Amino acid sequence: MDKKIICLFGPQGSGKGTQAKILTDRLNIPHISTGDLFRIAIESKTDLGQQVESILKSGELVPDQLTFDLLKERISQNDCAGGFVLDGFPRTLNQARLLDQYVEINHIVVIDISDKESLKRLTNRRYHVKTGEIYNLYTSPKPSKEIEPELVQRADDTEEAIKTRLQTYHSETEPLFVYYKEKVMHVNGEQSIDKVAQDIAKSLNISI
């Protein structure tokens, strides 16, 4: 199998994480997200992890170079030899240029949903404090009637917060689709999970 380096894009609520898991299970390659990289680095108390923790605690964004340094460490590991699925990096043109110096992405998959759909999905997302499980009143997984009263909405899932994140996605991330133009494939994210997975597989010429 040829080495596959796939980058998933899509606005908040587009289901990138779900589709990344389906892809990585099928292709037997790791799913790498910047959020996970930050968490693992902090838990392992590495020098980079301590820098990330300090920055996040101050409420600042982790600089591109530091995020990229964490990513380089991760993709140099043996399980990435056959490829990997990137989720959350690059987000900006500067990040893309850093990445291009180190590795070449083969495929860019953009999962498209409207701002209206994104808002509907994320404002209906709920967090169960006792178990840490995430539910959704609009999509899946839906909570049972018994636990619904115990669910809370996270601060970053309010309409105002989501609109701010969507504006950032449109202004900073969408220009990457022009930057990577010949490698970009769009799929309709406003379908069932299985249908989105099938469309992604078709675009990548793999079977799911």
Image: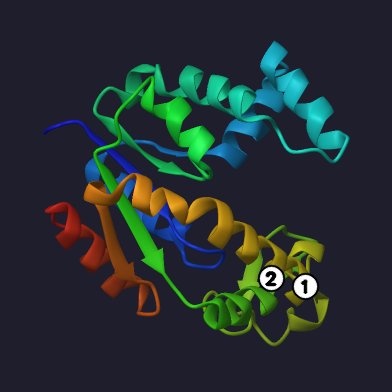
- Estimate the x, y position of residue 122 in percent, counting from the top left: 64, 73
Distance between the alpha carbons at the discs numbered 1 and 2: 5 Å
Q: Quadrant of residue 196?
A: bottom left
Q: Quadrant of the N terminus?
A: top left
- Report the amino acid beneath label 2: Lys
Q: Residue at x 45, y 58 (%)?
A: 16
For this view, does 108 lie left or right of residue 91?
Answer: left
Camera-nearest residue between 95 and 72: 95
SS state under label 1: helix
Q: Residue at x 61, y 41 (%)?
A: 35
Residue at mark 1: 160
Q: Residue at x 29, y 29 (%)?
A: 104
For this view, does 192 lie left or right of residue 61?
Answer: left
Residue at mark 2: 163
Residue 157 visible in the displayed image = yes
Camera-nearest residue between 141 and 199: 199
Q: Say few, some or many: other residues with alpha carbon within 10 Å of mark 1 (under 14 / 14 to 19 / 20 or more).
A: few
For this view, does 125 lie left or right of residue 169?
Answer: right
- Report the amino acid beneath label 1: Glu
